[in-house]
Amino acid sequence: MRSAAIKRKTKETDIEVSVNLDGTGVVEIATGIGFFDHMLDLLARHSRIDMTVKAVGDLHIDFHHTTEDVGIALGQAVKQALGDMAGITRYASIHMPMDETLTRVVIDVSGRPMLVFRTAFSRDKIGEFDTELVREWFNAFAMNAGITLHVETLYGENAHHIAESCFKGLARALRAALAIDPRNKGEVPSTKGQLGG
């Protein structure tokens, strides 16, 4: 079973996450940030990754530390669960619609972290959640999961729809890229024989 659990505690946050990459999307999320919980719920359900996230953070200051640190911990958990990445499909490309919005998400589970994020929001906040934190979360996740991730919103107006299309797009891209390809016969999908360097 490709699963992992991570605990991360700093002066700003106390976070516990677990993932099962071969799950069915069973999810338990509690970060204290309603909109963020909603996005993580979408991520788990549409990727079919079983996911638990429990976070206590300095929300009296703002949502930045909690959002970023959850991205770090989830990225670390995915990377640990992948192990040597033998047999994975590795690449995926998704166009994710959400009403008037369309976002393209392209992923390479390469072991070489990179984020290209070309998404603009129509307003600064969704409820109490700062829209700039969407990019912060994606960056933290990509860097710590060791994946190359391109997220580009081709068009859209509603800020909630834009964020949702990004998270759902990532979910479906992860679902495809992390899947075991039986034709790979347990081999690492790289001519170098390894990923990450």
Image: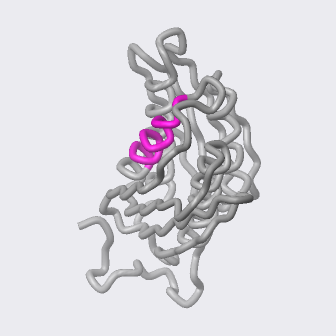
Q: Which of the 4 image quarters holds residue 96? A: bottom right
Q: Nearer the viewer, residue 136 or 155?
A: 155
User: Residue 72's x, y, as percent?
Assistant: 43, 39
Q: Image check: 183 left or right of 44?
A: left
User: Residue 78's x, y, as percent?
Assistant: 50, 52
Q: Image check: 28 left or right of 177?
A: right
Q: Nearer the viewer, residue 170 or 100?
A: 100
Residue at the (30%, 86%) spot, across then down: 191
User: Residue 157's x, y, as percent?
Assistant: 62, 50
Q: Quick one: which residue is furthest to the top in this view?
A: 60
Residue at the (34%, 81%) spot, across then down: 190
Q: Is residue 15 above or below residue 119?
A: above
| Quarter in which the C terminus is drawn | bottom left
Q: Image check: 187 left or right of 155?
A: left
Q: Nearer the viewer, residue 99 or 90?
A: 99
User: Residue 95's x, y, as percent?
Assistant: 60, 70
Magenta stretch: dominant SS? helix
Q: Is residue 189 above or below residue 171?
A: below
Q: Is residue 131 above or below residue 145?
A: above
The range drawn in magenta is: 130-141
| Quarter in which the N terminus is drawn | bottom right
Q: How is the image coloured?
A: one colour
Q: Image check: 82 left or right of 2?
A: left
Residue at the (49%, 31%) spot, across then down: 7
